[in-house]
Amino acid sequence: MFSLHGKTVLLTGASKGIGAATAKTLLDMGANLIAHYGGDRAGAEAAVAGVAADRVLLVQADLEKRAEVRRLWSDAIAWKGRVDVLVNNAAIFLNAGGIEEDEAEWDAVWEKTLQINVQAPADLMRGAVHHYKAKGGGIIITVVSWNAQRGSSSPKTIAYAASKGAIKAATQTIARTYADQNILAYIIAPGVVKTRMSEESAAVLGGVEKLTASLAMGEWVPPEEIGALIGFLSTGSCRHMTGGTIDFNGASYVR
C-alpha cells in the first residue's frame, strides 16, 4: 500500500465534496494534514474526525482576500516546518454574471471568480515553488474541471470555465519550468462529481436527471475516487507524469 507517513500536505477546501473525501484519504495514508476551510469549520472537523491532534491543523482563510491566502501559506509552513504537497482544490462556481447579464454583475462575478479560482491558488503555488526549491523538491496537485478543456455549455458560467483553464495553464507552466528541480505538478480535471457544486451546475443544464442521462456511465463521479487519485499522486510515485492532465469523467468526455 502506498504511504504518506512523514509527509505534510496542505489541502484547500477540505470541508466538503472532493476536499472532505481527500482529507480522509490523505490521513488514512498517514499524512500530516493542514486542512483549509472557508466558513464551514464543522465540515472540516467532520472530515478529520478521529485523527490525533498532532497530525491535523485546521486553518480558516478567506481566499477572496490575498492577505489571508498568504497567511494560510505561512501558517502551513510554521506548523511542521515544511509542506511536501500542496493540493489546490478550493474553488467557487457562480451561476451568474454571464454574457447576457448586466455589466455590474458581470464585473463582480469575474472579479470574485478569478481571485478565488486563479489568484489564490497561484499565490499558494508561488509560495510552494520557493519553498520546494529550498527543500529539494515537492508536489503540487491542482483540481480543475473538464470545462478547462472544453469550455462551459452555459454562457452564465463563462467566468468559471475561464478560471479553470487559467489555473490549469499556470500549473503546467510550473511543471515545465521546474521539473529539473524535482518540483512535480499534476492537474486533475473532473467531470460531474457527486458534490453540491455539481448539483448547482445541474440546475443550469436542465436538472439532475437530464445531466445524469448524458453521462457515459449513467452516474456521477464519487468524490472518494478523486481523493484516492490525489493520495496516489501525493506519494510522488509517478514523477514522469508531471505536467499531465488526468481526465476523470467516466468516459463522458474523451480526448
Image (cartoon, helix red, strand yellow):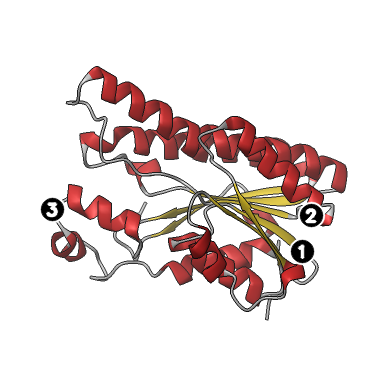
Residue type of the residue flagged with mark 3: Gly
Residue drawn 72% across the image and 70% down it: 53
Q: Which of marks 1 and 3 is nearer the N terminus?
A: 1
Q: Which of marks 2 and 1 is nearer the N terminus?
A: 1
- Examine the rendering and report whether any part of residue 108 can be seen: yes
Query: On the image, numbered disc 2 is attached to which residue?
Result: 79
Taking the view exactly as shown, the residue that stands out farthest to the bottom is: 1
Residue type of the residue flagged with mark 1: Lys
Label ID, residue 206:
3
User: Could you give the CA–CA distance between mark 2 and mark 3, rounded to whole angstroms?
Assistant: 45 Å
Which x, y percent locates residue 33? Answer: 68, 62
Q: Is mark 1 on a helix, strand or loop?
A: loop
Q: What element carries label 3?
A: loop
Which x, y percent locates residue 13? Answer: 52, 53
Quarter where residue 199 is shown: bottom left
Q: Is mark 2 on a helix, strand or loop?
A: helix
Q: Nearer the viewer, mark 2 or mark 3?
A: 2
Residue drawn 78% across the image and 48% down it: 77
Question: Which of 20/189 is in front?
Answer: 20
Residue type of the residue flagged with mark 2: Trp
Label ID, residue 7:
1
Q: Is the Cβ of the residue at disc 2 closer than 8 Å to that at disc 1?
A: no
Which x, y percent locates residue 99? Answer: 21, 26
User: Could you give the CA–CA distance between mark 2 and mark 1, rounded to whole angstroms?
Assistant: 12 Å
